[in-house]
């Protein structure tokens, strides 16, 4: 892999049962590129958590992926309500997920913590009423 | 041990297609909170869960578990079975509870 691979995914906010399309697709691409299973797992899990957050909390958004020989960078962006307190949201166990999401096995307040534990860098920028961007970087 | 051994030795029901990749089974994880499972289940584990919604297929794919095992005779929605088939994920069922299944799997893996 000598050049940059850029991928764009729209994340449908209407049906969170289909969330995971972007992470599954990126997983396949990384596998084809010969990236190690450990790195693939980190990217897949952190991307899926971010996808689920985008669907549950923001009603959808987009993921832009850049794969270079030394890193995988993903930017999730949405125009949702924003996060009031990013530091609190990052805390394991804190959740504002609705009941339907909890019934489906989400909303344990582990999503952002899971992302943090699986990536080399995470940057969250959020403004109330404007939206949120979550940037994750995994070094290869 | 492989998935086919698990099915025959524990008398499990294969809910997805008969033509599946007979992957190795090396461990077992029980969990229903999907984020929790994603952070702890290992590749080649049997994942025992009472969740049957579509998202379990994505979680199984991303964590690279060997298969999903649904306990307590819980029925699995056809949409989940269809998605599992499309993604090459094996879903098994059993009337036994999670504890009994994990003990049995543990015994076979030793």
Image (tube, rainbow, N blue to C red):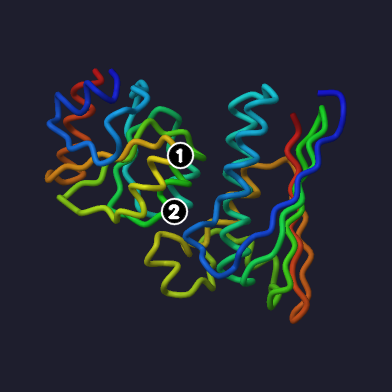
Quick check: B46 above or below A56? above
Residue A93 on image: x %, y %? 51, 62
What chain letter is assigned to the residue under label 2? B
Q: Which of marks 1 and 2 is nearer the N terminus?
A: 2
Q: Which of B55 and A45 is in front in this view?
A: B55
Q: How crowded is mark 2: few (under 14 residues within 10 Å), some or many (20 or more)?
A: many
With A75 as the anchor, is B75 left or right in this view?
A: left
Mark 1 to mark 2 CA distance (whole Å): 12 Å
**Foreground: disc 1 or disc 2:** 1
Residue B92 on image: x %, y %? 25, 39
With B96 as the anchor, is A119 left or right in this view?
A: right
Quick check: A9 above or below A101? above
Residue B36 on image: x %, y %? 45, 50
What chain letter is assigned to the residue under label 1? B
The residue that appears at 63% across and 56% down in the rendered structure is A50
Quick check: A94 above or below B35? below
Query: Furthest-bottom residue in view?
Result: A129
Q: How crowded is mark 1: few (under 14 residues within 10 Å), some or many (20 or more)?
A: some
Q: Hey, which quadrant is residue A44 in on the image?
A: top right
Q: Hey, which quadrant is residue B15 in on the image?
A: top left
Residue A123 on image: x %, y %? 78, 55
* Image quadrant occupied by the C terminus of chain A: top right
The residue that appears at 37% across and 67% down in the rendered structure is A103
The residue identified by callout 2 is B55
Tell me, for residue B87, which label it has, or none. 1
Q: In what element is the residue under mark 1? A: helix
With A24 as the anchor, is B12 left or right in this view?
A: left
Q: In what element is the residue under mark 2? A: helix
Q: Hey, which quadrant is residue A38 in on the image?
A: top right
Query: Furthest-right residue in view?
Result: A3
């Amino acid at each position: 892999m000598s050049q940059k691979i850029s991928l764009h995914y729209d994340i449908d906010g209407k049906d969170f049962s289909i969330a995971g399309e972007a992470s599954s697709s990126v997983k396949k691409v990384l596998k084809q590129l010969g990236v190690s299973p450990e790195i693939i797992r980190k990217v897949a899990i952190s991307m899926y958590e971010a996808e689920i957050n985008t669907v549950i909390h923001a009603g959808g958004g987009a993921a832009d992926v850049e794969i270079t020989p030394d890193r995988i960078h993903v930017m999730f962006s949405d125009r949702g309500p924003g996060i009031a307190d990013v530091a609190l949201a990052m805390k394991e166990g804190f959740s504002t997920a609705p009941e339907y999401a909890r019934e489906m096995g989400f909303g344990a307040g582990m999503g952002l913590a899971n992302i943090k534990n699986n990536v080399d860098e995470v940057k969250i920028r959020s403004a109330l009423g404007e939206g949120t961007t979550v940037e994750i970087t995994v070094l290869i | 041990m492989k998935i086919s051994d698990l099915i025959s030795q524990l008398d499990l029901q294969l809910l997805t297609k008969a033509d599946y990749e007979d992957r190795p089974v090396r461990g077992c994880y029980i969990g229903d909170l999907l984020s929790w499972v994603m952070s702890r289940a290992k590749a080649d584990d049997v994942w025992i869960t009472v969740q049957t919604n579509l998202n379990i297929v994505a979680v199984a794919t991303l964590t690279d578990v060997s298969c999903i095992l649904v306990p307590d005779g819980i029925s699995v929605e056809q949409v989940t079975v269809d998605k599992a088939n499309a993604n090459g994920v094996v879903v098994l069922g059993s009337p036994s509870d999670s504890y009994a299944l994990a003990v049995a799997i543990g015994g076979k893996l030793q």
